[in-house]
Image (spheres, coloured by chain):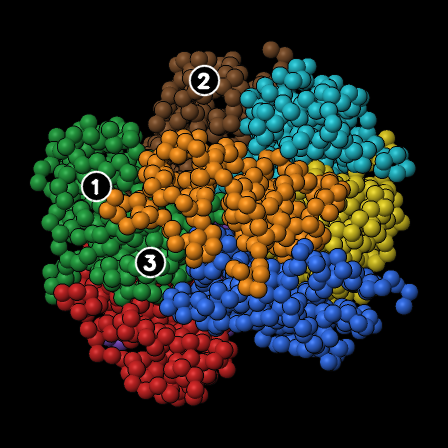
Chain colours: A orange, B yellow, C cyan, D purple, E brown, F green, G red, H blue
Amino acid sequence: MAEPDGVVPGVAELDHDRARRRGYPEAVYCEGKSPDQLRRIATALAARPGDAATIFTRADDVRAAAVLEVLPDARHEPDARLLAWPPGEPDPTGGLVVVVCAGTSDLPVAREAELTARYLGRRTELVVDVGVAGIHRVLARVETLRAADAVVVVAGMDGALPGVVAGLVSAPVVAVPTSVGYGAAFEGLAPLLTMLNACAPGVGVVNIDNGYGGGHLAAQIAAPRAGGRMG
Amino acid sequence: MAEPDGVVPGVAELDHDRARRRGYPEAVYCEGKSPDQLRRIATALAARPGDAATIFTRADDVRAAAVLEVLPDARHEPDARLLAWPPGEPDPTGGLVVVVCAGTSDLPVAREAELTARYLGRRTELVVDVGVAGIHRVLARVETLRAADAVVVVAGMDGALPGVVAGLVSAPVVAVPTSVGYGAAFEGLAPLLTMLNACAPGVGVVNIDNGYGGGHLAAQIAAPRAGGRMG
Amino acid sequence: MAEPDGVVPGVAELDHDRARRRGYPEAVYCEGKSPDQLRRIATALAARPGDAATIFTRADDVRAAAVLEVLPDARHEPDARLLAWPPGEPDPTGGLVVVVCAGTSDLPVAREAELTARYLGRRTELVVDVGVAGIHRVLARVETLRAADAVVVVAGMDGALPGVVAGLVSAPVVAVPTSVGYGAAFEGLAPLLTMLNACAPGVGVVNIDNGYGGGHLAAQIAAPRAGGRMG
Amino acid sequence: MAEPDGVVPGVAELDHDRARRRGYPEAVYCEGKSPDQLRRIATALAARPGDAATIFTRADDVRAAAVLEVLPDARHEPDARLLAWPPGEPDPTGGLVVVVCAGTSDLPVAREAELTARYLGRRTELVVDVGVAGIHRVLARVETLRAADAVVVVAGMDGALPGVVAGLVSAPVVAVPTSVGYGAAFEGLAPLLTMLNACAPGVGVVNIDNGYGGGHLAAQIAAPRAGGRMG
Amino acid sequence: MAEPDGVVPGVAELDHDRARRRGYPEAVYCEGKSPDQLRRIATALAARPGDAATIFTRADDVRAAAVLEVLPDARHEPDARLLAWPPGEPDPTGGLVVVVCAGTSDLPVAREAELTARYLGRRTELVVDVGVAGIHRVLARVETLRAADAVVVVAGMDGALPGVVAGLVSAPVVAVPTSVGYGAAFEGLAPLLTMLNACAPGVGVVNIDNGYGGGHLAAQIAAPRAGGRMG
Amino acid sequence: MAEPDGVVPGVAELDHDRARRRGYPEAVYCEGKSPDQLRRIATALAARPGDAATIFTRADDVRAAAVLEVLPDARHEPDARLLAWPPGEPDPTGGLVVVVCAGTSDLPVAREAELTARYLGRRTELVVDVGVAGIHRVLARVETLRAADAVVVVAGMDGALPGVVAGLVSAPVVAVPTSVGYGAAFEGLAPLLTMLNACAPGVGVVNIDNGYGGGHLAAQIAAPRAGGRMG
Amino acid sequence: MAEPDGVVPGVAELDHDRARRRGYPEAVYCEGKSPDQLRRIATALAARPGDAATIFTRADDVRAAAVLEVLPDARHEPDARLLAWPPGEPDPTGGLVVVVCAGTSDLPVAREAELTARYLGRRTELVVDVGVAGIHRVLARVETLRAADAVVVVAGMDGALPGVVAGLVSAPVVAVPTSVGYGAAFEGLAPLLTMLNACAPGVGVVNIDNGYGGGHLAAQIAAPRAGGRMG
Amino acid sequence: MAEPDGVVPGVAELDHDRARRRGYPEAVYCEGKSPDQLRRIATALAARPGDAATIFTRADDVRAAAVLEVLPDARHEPDARLLAWPPGEPDPTGGLVVVVCAGTSDLPVAREAELTARYLGRRTELVVDVGVAGIHRVLARVETLRAADAVVVVAGMDGALPGVVAGLVSAPVVAVPTSVGYGAAFEGLAPLLTMLNACAPGVGVVNIDNGYGGGHLAAQIAAPRAGGRMG
């Protein structure tokens, strides 16, 4: 293969340097890529042994099948629409990432966040179905929440949970709005605005349904620090 | 005066029949009316003794002065931008309306709601500064909240409070979003959407900064019922 | 089953305490839940006899089938996308809830509101096809409307009906916008805004197409009151 | 003056041909024009005797003064922010234009519509303060409304009135939304959408607060027709 | 059939009085109605001979088939998604309605407008593919445009055509925005706003893709007038 | 064929004069046109030999097949949803157009832009997968970018690339936002706004996903100029 | 002064390298900068003789006075809110930029565009008051428009002019929407969308009221080219 | 004073417990509070010695004067609209917070972020005027950026800088959009969306112009950790 390492001609230029530059591996966003393009990207990855796991996000069944055709031993988590290759998770370092999921319908995004944080090297814990409509459910988990070095809160509808959680803990809260809800949620706009307007400081917001982004940011926040951040 | 009773020629047609038809007096919305128009409306009211109090809402200093010029004994509550004439509150009947105010900046709207409910004949109680960022402040008031027959919750920014309150009480919650907040609150759009998407059922939403509407709806909900609603 | 009562591990934490806390049973929002998750939730319900009926909302054919597989005697109202188990409606208490439906296309949402109010224990009456374009149709129903302790008005397109109804009755009006209409209705945004801006006070608005929320709020408003609200 | 007739060098090119081409004189939109530019436009008009009246719209006090400086005999209607020169109204021809104003705060826009229709040669009638919150007020005017060849309905807040009126008459309804209302009216967006979504056919909508446009369209609709439209 | 004339129990209340009250027959909006509901409405119509034609709008193939099952002799124009029963058009009276279509993709909406105007009793003419990108195409049709008593202009994308046409004719222009266009047309929002902001007065705007509403309003504008409008 | 040259009766009026008037051939926008309409347009084209290539844009598989049925030798580029007939590209004149594609998912739009520029007579170069998240990738291409007479930058998500490129080159940048991205990209709204707000001057923005428009504008910018533009 | 050349400590880092890197001088955007900051920036400029003129944009009276205090010989064009120092315009090279202004109220933005193009070294011509409502005014200027190497079209309200102009010329059109118009123009959103959706290809859009950006892009398009773009 | 500690009757309930509960002191948001309310809050603070500094944010001149009247030794930073009392900054612990400011007009927000981080106990560094239009300015600061434990990036207009910075560092980036920019920035909406859609992971977004929130979140991220987060 005459192309420079990591270049898939006419398709993508993999950023192998990224792990060294930023400390984290790149992910392949599958939505909008054709199965054929994904097969070519997977092939380029397979030709390059020794790297940390690459994550494939937003992979529906057809796209996941294309990746698995080339990388049959990849780990596939259909509910989170995520694949990872090589499949092994790294040994955890740094702090704990707690992922909180407001409702059952938000689970796919929450799981994507949790798996992302794990593949970036953090310990994680998942707390499900603790919406603010029953505030006692949140309060019952305060101990777990306060053990976290970073909390990811995934919520649709009113998106009120991150602000409530941020008022209970000292760790930063990463808020992930989802597109779950009735019409006036406007595909996630409502919880997005709620989270941006959270009364409690300490909430950083990422894109709608972007579990990958939420897990990544939380993993960075909870990364090990010894002397310098990268130490 | 040759005009039919309650008509201010070329300006307004007062709805004297309203108290009989709906059980509640009309209010005069001052915004957008000129001081001169308000003086003429006040004069028409003064010519008609014996009615229940009429409320003037959204009256800035200039408009309030115009009303007071004609009706010097009117009650004026500048912080709520409200006047009432005749000034006396009716004897309370029906249930209790509790007005909850998330932050100090929401107070003018909360006060407008409270006074409206009183002039429509309800007992009221005002609870201030209990935002969700410190959820313990809300929980400390649960007893008061549960005593209410209708709760009005006034909140800007993330507007998360009505949903939390609705999860704690069995009475209906009237949610009033305010235009208080940073840029992404978009003049009240953010809390409005939050309230419409409240996870807990039992929340009815009114217009942004519309304390009058919130207090009116709550007064209707808490109205006395004996046999039939109007009994 | 070692799990605490009502917990479906990794899926949902049923809020059995809710009936006691708020006086109303919880509902299961089916949209966004997988058929398998719904089967597990239904199984947890089936294991817990003696409760009031649980409502399943927004259940399309596939999800309804999943629930019926586990709870074959559940009541299923396909047009309202609703199931209830146990199927029996409670004996009605409190006042009358009148549900008004502006157009035939709004019927599914109106029916969801009506059934919800019934399962929460209210008598209901349904009035169909009375849009403001033929105002005489509304006026012909005034007697029915004035008999209500709470009126639910379901309307798409211009959403003008709740404001007109509120001007005719003394009971509170719960307005439910629907996503029915031409392009500039923007999936329910237009009637939502109309209802929030209703000239007549006494209108509380819930989410777009949220018949469940509308019926619930109306049932709370019309709940029996003897001495205190919960009496 | 060497410039071609009607050209104000570097400022405006008056469309003298318009009356002949379209049958209606041009108007000067004052907002955004400097007093000096308006003086120069007025001077160009003054130099050209014999034309039908030109209307100046959206003229605040400063801009009106600039026009009056050059054309002291112009008619000035401050409440409608409108001037006309020469001041005389044409003899009316064609049908009747009825202008309906939902609330007192909408009067400036309604007056602009009425005066525009008159200067375009129609008879007009103005009906004030007939919002849908008291539907009996509208019904009391049905006879007047049915006498119209074109009805202009001016309304802010929920903007529901045009749809109700259109359901009562056979003449076309021109709907003019205004920026009057609480926050969720979003400066006229709410009534604009309501009017576009009116359930009753026969409603044509113009821009927010555009009384001039509403009056102009109504005058065209009610124009005399003998054989052909222009006859 | 014990029901009052025109009532389809639990589905619709046909407005037989409408022709007498407004001078125009009612239309049945098919979107959102089930095939079964349409069959029942068609059956009610069939039971009532002697009326003017009823129009069924927004009827996709499935819904059209349901209507045709009951009313096999109905006229069906699939491209306009419209049916009419009885099929015969009335003899034309009043003026001429010219329907102008900016692009080929706007044809379905333009045809719906044209057929509506015909069934309401007007002569019509259809002009296709005259977008402003080739302004000479518009100018070549000026004679036809000036012959109209009402012009309907149907356009998507930039929606600029109605303003250009309004500047060329003295008759009122009814503007119908369509959802045709690239992403930033936002499903018709862009042409809608353009039309509302048309520089030339004389443009009344109806809902996005609402050919029925556009044709109806134009038919009203071009209706015969002798003495009074309804004469 | 009795119709004037280029007219497809009732469907389209081809603008043969366009090449002479503007210097560029017309394109056929296929979205919203039926396969039958496209066959008729293709037939009209086939009847008129000797022209420059006509481009068919936004042609999905069904529509492409309709065109190919009539013009079997047309060039079809499925990934760009584009056809051209006659298939031959013109000999290039003028300057170089460089098309930059931020991510793999943006490739279809970028390819449409590139092919359009070629069929309008420019040399092109395509640079892929150079998003701002790895700024070194952009910098590595500066030499290519600076060789361009016009740069087309195609990007979704944050749409930040055009502003960065404009800061590096002296040639004009044509920015094409795409609908690629997570929820808060709102179908291309986010990158559209970013591009309009680019800090670096020299960026002209076209419609979302409008590769045709981007390539066309770039081809005009890079057109040969000798003396006058049209020389 | 120990700071590196062009650095205003704690305020700005002037980009002296820009002329060399991009071929154009930097501009100072005054809005949001304090008078004191502008004085410090002006002082830094004054200390650096021999450069091409720097443009100060969006300078209201207070900010312009601050600049003139330090650079009293700067050219100040108040209507365009622009200053230039040194005041001399460069000798024109390259092609002709024609700036077209739809209405008088758009003049400030049009003048900003024209002056910017001049200070970047182009010949310019300004055409005023040629809105599409009188299409003959546009057609009367076709010769001038066709002489341009780049056309800047400045328009508010419906923003239809750029699309019409683009259909008449072969040169690229730079479209500048303005915030001029009635309420539904939404501060420039309406003309912005119109321009992005222009039916005629060849239109590149810049930010609302951004005359500077429009003039800059046009100057780049009309820049001299001999062999290579920068030659 | 009989009131419980920290309660300002009818105004605010200070959250003294907050430092213990979350590890950070509360701030007083001044916007929307009256000078009198602020004086009462300041008085309550003054009565409670020994606490960490309280920050007053969004204090315009009038509100700042009210606070200084009661707390004359408070530190006042007018450009950041911030006061702190007691004035002393705590001794820094934890990591370094670097605040990056895209343009001079964004400085007030950037300064608010920096001061907030300092009063929460972090070392800070401020980097100004490094917008993406001159990407070399950003690259010249990479060393500083990489030394940070948290980076706050403040930007208006296109808001592209946070995504570029996140691609260069491994520390989390807190993005603060500002309301600086031309019309299509829509008061900060454009940079807000850009930041939420940043291609590079690792960006958490806060509210528009919310320098306080940005500095607070960064301070939490860079907080000292020894064993557990709170250790």
Q: Nearer the viewer, mark 3 or mark 1?
A: 3
User: Mark 2 and mark 3, same subunit?
Assistant: no
User: Mark 3 and mark 1, same subunit?
Assistant: yes
Q: Is residue F137 visible?
A: yes
Write down the quadrant of residue C84 in the picture.
top right
Q: Disc 1 is attached to a residue of which chain? A: F
Residue that label 1 marks? F55
Q: Is residue H154 left or right of residue E210?
A: right
Q: Residues within 10 Å of mark 1 (few under 14, many from 20)?
A: many
Which secondary structure lies at badge 2?
A: helix
Does residue B203 sit above or below F39 in this rendering? below
Residue that label 3 marks? F138
Q: Label for residue C13?
A: none
Which secondary structure lies at badge 1?
A: strand
Query: Residue drawn 15% across and 50% down?
Result: F121
Q: Disc 3 is attached to a residue of which chain? A: F
Q: Amino acid at mark 1?
A: Ile
Q: Disc 2 is attached to a residue of which chain? A: E
Q: Is residue A208 left or right of residue B13?
A: left
Q: Nearer the viewer, residue A225 or D51?
A: A225
Could you tell me residue H138's position as x and y percent? 42, 67
Q: Nearer the viewer, residue D176 or D91?
A: D176
Q: How many angstroms separate mark 1 from mark 2 (CA)?
A: 41 Å
Query: Residue drawn 71% across and 31% down?
Result: C7
Q: Is residue C119 left or right of residue H82?
A: right
Query: Outermost residue toward the left?
Result: F50
Q: Are marks 1 and 2 in contact (CB under 8 Å)?
A: no
